[in-house]
Amino acid sequence: MIGRIASLVVALAICGTALGIDSEGPLPDPQLQARYERLTNELRCLVCQNQTVADSNADLAKDLRDRTRAMLLAGASDDEIVSFMTDRYGDFVLYRPPVSSRTLLLWTAPALLLLAGSVIAFFVIRRRSLVSDLPEEGEDPFQSSEAEHRS
């Protein structure tokens, strides 16, 4: 019984991935197909946001794939297609947005957060080591140093 359920789950998973494949098939020219795949893997699905247009099953992603295909067949360059998409959807449609004054924080935030975390960790560790070096309450701080000098 469990084997049948597992088989059904696997079959449904395989069928679900088939929906993501373009229904129109590959482009006639292998170079166009390579450009199409590269472009759809560089564009972000605005509905899913964590998937490329190539990987998404959303209706908008399908529309973007169809538009990319049509523009390639019409002879548009990669830059023209990317420009078309960014004009309509902004830099967010790109998986790798360009470095500009608007995206500077996006590119520098990981390094700034790592630096801030390192500085905080340094001070916390330093503070703990200073606190652990202090004598306990009721203990004579000079007693241990006299014993060390006698030996």
Image: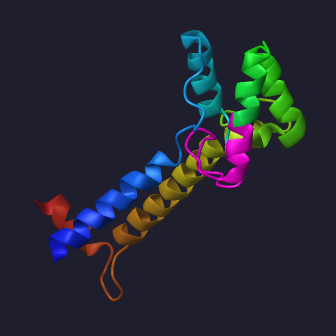
Task: Classify residue 44 as left or right of residue 86.
Answer: left
Question: Of residues 105 and 121, which is closer to you in this image?
Answer: 105
Image coords of residue 103 (percent x, y):
79, 38
Residue at 64% across / 41% down in the picture?
Answer: 53
Expressed as whole percent of the image width and height from the top left, the position of residue 88 reads 88, 39
- In the picture provided, is 87 more to the left or to the right than 146? right
Was residue 86 drawn as part of the magenta stretch in this picture?
no
Residue at (33% x, 74% y) in the render: 141
Observer able to see residue 27 = yes
Residue occupying the point 37% across, 52% down = 14
In the image, the segment drawn in magenta is 47-65
Q: What colour scheme does the image use?
A: rainbow
The quadrant the C terminus occupies is bottom left
Q: Is residue 40 above or below residue 145?
A: above
Residue 92, compared with residue 27, is above or below; it is: below
Residue 97 visible to an observer of this rendering: no
**Rendered view: 68 above or below 127:** above
The residue lying toward the viewer, choosing from 113 and 23, is: 23
Q: Nearer the viewer, residue 116 or 83?
A: 83
Residue 88 horizontal side relative to residue 144, left or right: right
Q: Is residue 59 magenta?
A: yes
Q: Of 24 and 31, which appears nearest the observer?
A: 24
Residue drawn at point x = 80 percent, y = 37 percent: 91
